[in-house]
Amino acid sequence: MSLHDDLLAQASRLARSEPRRPKQASLRRAVSTAYYALFHLLISEGSTVMSPMSDAKLRVIVARAFQHGAMKAVASDSQGKFSKELTPTLASLRHTPEHREHVL
């Protein structure tokens, strides 16, 4: 399993660890860990795209070139810019049991 998969699994465990009355600390740690998982997924995918035929050592070098601040700025710039056709679908999916089960 990759680091981002492990982190996402850990976030899920943290979010589900106290089903009746979850502590804020557990929920915050779950969100933080999920964010960290996304960060590592983007780095992994990006370094693979930038060096698809390269050896693992070069991919590690490429991965280290990613900067958290720059990645966050790009994500912030695109926040709220989903297509108007897609936004209602995404919003309605957030409330389905399948989505909640998948997220947690």
Image: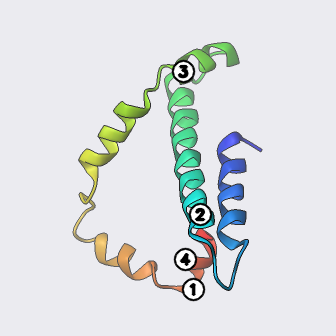
Does label 3 or label 2 sit earlier along the sequence? Answer: 2
> Which numbered marker is on residue 20?
none
Query: Label 4 crowding class (10 Å Cα cut-off): few <14, some 14-19, many 20+?
Result: few
Give whichever of 22, 60 is nearer the camera: 22
CA distance for labels 1 and 4: 5 Å
Label 2 vs 4, first from the N-terminus: 2
Query: Label 2 sits on what residue type?
Result: Ala
Residue at disc 3, secondary structure: helix
The residue labelled by disc 3 is 64
Q: Residue at x 22, y 69 (%)?
A: 84
Distance CA(mark 3)–CA(mark 2): 30 Å
- The quadrant the C terminus occupies is bottom right
* Gap in angstroms between the C-alphas marked 4 and 3: 33 Å
Give the quarter of the image for residue 45.
top right
Quarter assignment of residue 63: top right
Nearer the N terminus, badge 2 or badge 1?
2
Tell me the amino acid under the disc marked 1.
Answer: Pro
Which numbered circle lies on residue 25? 2
Query: In this figure, which residue is indicated by the disc labeled 4?
Result: 99
Q: Amino acid at mark 3?
A: Arg
Which residue corresponds to the image point at 27% horizontal and 49% vertical from the top-left?
Answer: 78
Tell me the CA gap for discs 2 and 4. 23 Å
Earlier-in-chain disc, 4 versus 3: 3
- Mark 3 surroundings: few (<14), some (14-19) or many (≥20) residues within 10 A: few
Front tag of 3 and 2: 2
Question: The N terminus lies in which quarter of the figure?
Answer: top right
Alpha carbon distance from label 2 to label 1: 24 Å
Q: Nearer the viewer, mark 2 or mark 1?
A: 2
Where is residue 34 shown, x and y percent of the image? 57, 54
Q: Residue 76 location, x and y as percent? A: 29, 47
Mark drawn on residue 97: 1
Q: Is residue 102 above or below residue 34?
A: below
